[in-house]
């Protein structure tokens, strides 16, 4: 049995080899059949075997056109002003009349503190001021600054006594010269004169003190009145509430935050420019921007240029004002912008149909010596046809290219100098006859 099984082994292996050979031959035959269906290239005029005949293609000249030279940068929309409203006093918050997103106007009351204690303090300050006015003898409606101490009754009385003492001392001097009085009488009149002078000086000092006291009391009353007014916190500008930082019933200390406001009309467009372009920027340059939020495009101009580069990334900050009357634009939005450096720059341009893109490479075919020579280029920008469709769209070339024949002429296209750019399945050894 063993010998018989060994004798049957070779025929089975031979049949297996024939089966695999037949399986491999089937796709090969299909591939050959597919290649046989490809159209045969017509013989070239030169009679070289296997060479395709030249094909005529349309050509167009690369031209220099007025194309604004721009710089693409990114930036952010920032509010024109930001303010955090705080409590100027210690007190309990009795009312907060706004919420996030509430539109406010300048002078609109946003929050109120409990004002009872401050009103009582103002009443006490007013009473103290009235007492000081009475002590000074001010007439109704007269202020402490306008008060003249020399016209007060106390000073006038002291001045009259001083004048009387002066006259009496003069008579005593004359009488003593005539021998009609004694030296002791003269000394007594001199003492009365000195006392009268002291009383006048004291009256003036008293009035000055009372006047200063009145000024102090009136200042205290003004401070108390201002405290009553400060219990109402108002918006400093037209804007919108960005954040609530306190709630009704909170006891606030001086400086405690209540709400944060933004002035969003206008907004500030802040762009960051690289250092190598900082010398070319000037106020008045046009900016074309588009927010990532989907808001309408922005057209504005440079309003302010920073005097120095930032220390962190050595960038130049440029600002522009963006009107936002309806609040469509939002502060903090990311913006992609183009800064127009030269609106009348001349740029080499070609029709988009002349550009070939394959495997991430951009190239054109330049008519040279009657043949199409491949030239790799770097494209800057694309723009569509102008209104009316009179001209074809143009593509801006960043590199250099030799102008081809005049528009309307034809140049033969030779696939031997222009490799196929259709599919990686085409053989580079054989010329491609497929249309472009």
Image (spheres, rainbow, N blue to C red):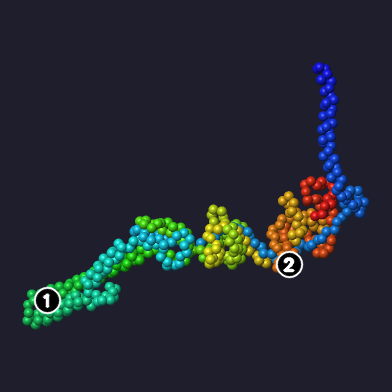
Q: Position of residue 247 (x, y in %)?
A: 40, 57
Q: Position of residue 333 (x, y in %)?
A: 55, 58
Pair 2/1: label in front: 2
Q: CA distance from mark 2 to mark 1?
A: 118 Å
Q: Which mark is residue 389?
A: 2
Which residue occupies 58% across, 61% down?
Answer: 295
**In the image: residue 409, left or right of residue 379:** right
- Tag 1 or tag 2, which sits nearer the N-term? 1
**In the image: residue 115, left or right of residue 244:** left
Q: Quadrant of the C terminus?
A: bottom right
Among the 4 quarters of the image, the one containing residue 159 = bottom left
Q: Which mark is residue 254?
A: none
In this view of the protein, can residue 55 be seen by the observer?
Answer: yes
Compared to residue 36, the image places residue 290 above or below, namely: below
Circle 1 SS class: helix
Q: Position of residue 346 (x, y in %)?
A: 70, 65
**In the image: residue 212, left or right of residue 273:** left
Q: Position of residue 73 (x, y in %)?
A: 61, 58
Among the 4 quarters of the image, the one containing residue 281 = bottom right
Q: Nearer the viewer, residue 315 or 251?
A: 251
Q: Which mark is residue 189?
A: 1
Q: Nearer the viewer, residue 209 or 50?
A: 50
Which residue occupies 59% across, 59% down?
Answer: 294
Which residue occupies 29% across, 67% down?
Answer: 221
């Amino acid at each position: 049995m063993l010998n018989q099984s060994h004798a049957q082994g070779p025929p089975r292996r031979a049949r297996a080899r024939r089966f695999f050979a037949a399986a491999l031959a089937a796709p090969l035959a299909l591939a050959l059949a597919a290649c046989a269906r490809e159209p045969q290239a017509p013989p070239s005029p030169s009679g070289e075997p296997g060479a395709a005949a030249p094909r005529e293609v349309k050509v167009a000249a690369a031209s220099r056109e007025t194309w604004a030279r721009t710089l693409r940068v990114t930036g952010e929309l920032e509010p024109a002003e930001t303010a955090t409203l705080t409590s100027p006093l210690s007190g309990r918050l009795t009312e907060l009349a706004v919420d996030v997103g509430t539109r406010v106007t300048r002078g609109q009351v946003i929050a109120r503190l409990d004002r009872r204690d401050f009103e009582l303090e103002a009443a006490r300050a007013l009473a103290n001021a009235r007492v000081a006015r009475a002590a000074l003898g001010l007439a109704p409606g007269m202020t402490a600054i306008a008060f003249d101490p020399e016209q007060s009754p106390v000073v006038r009385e002291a001045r009259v006594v001083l004048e009387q003492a002066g006259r009496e001392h003069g008579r005593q001097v004359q009488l003593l010269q005539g021998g009609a009085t004694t030296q002791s009488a003269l000394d007594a009149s001199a003492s009365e004169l000195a006392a009268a002078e002291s009383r006048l000086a004291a009256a003036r000092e008293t009035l000055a003190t009372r006047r200063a006291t009145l000024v102090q009391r009136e200042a205290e009353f003004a401070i108390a009145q201002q405290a009553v007014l400060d219990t109402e916190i108002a918006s400093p500008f037209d804007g919108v509430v960005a954040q609530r930082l306190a709630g009704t019933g909170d006891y606030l200390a001086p400086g405690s935050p209540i709400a944060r406001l933004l002035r969003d009309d206008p907004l500030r467009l802040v762009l960051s420019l690289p250092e190598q372009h900082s010398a070319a920027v000037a106020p008045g340059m046009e900016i074309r921007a588009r927010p990532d939020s989907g808001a309408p495009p922005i057209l504005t101009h440079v309003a302010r240029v920073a005097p120095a580069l930032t220390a962190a990334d050595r960038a130049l900050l440029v600002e522009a004002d963006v009107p936002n009357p309806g609040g469509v634009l939002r502060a903090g939005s990311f913006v992609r912008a183009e800064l127009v450096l030269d609106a009348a720059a001349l740029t080499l341009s070609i029709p988009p149909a002349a550009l070939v893109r394959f495997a991430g490479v951009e190239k054109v075919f330049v008519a040279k010596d009657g043949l199409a020579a491949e030239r790799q280029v770097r494209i800057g920008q694309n723009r569509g046809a102008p209104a009316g469709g009179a001209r074809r769209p143009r593509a801006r070339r960043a590199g250099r290219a030799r102008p081809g024949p005049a528009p309307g002429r034809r140049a033969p296209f030779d696939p031997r100098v222009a490799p196929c750019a259709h599919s990686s399945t085409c053989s580079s050894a054989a010329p491609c006859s497929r249309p472009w």
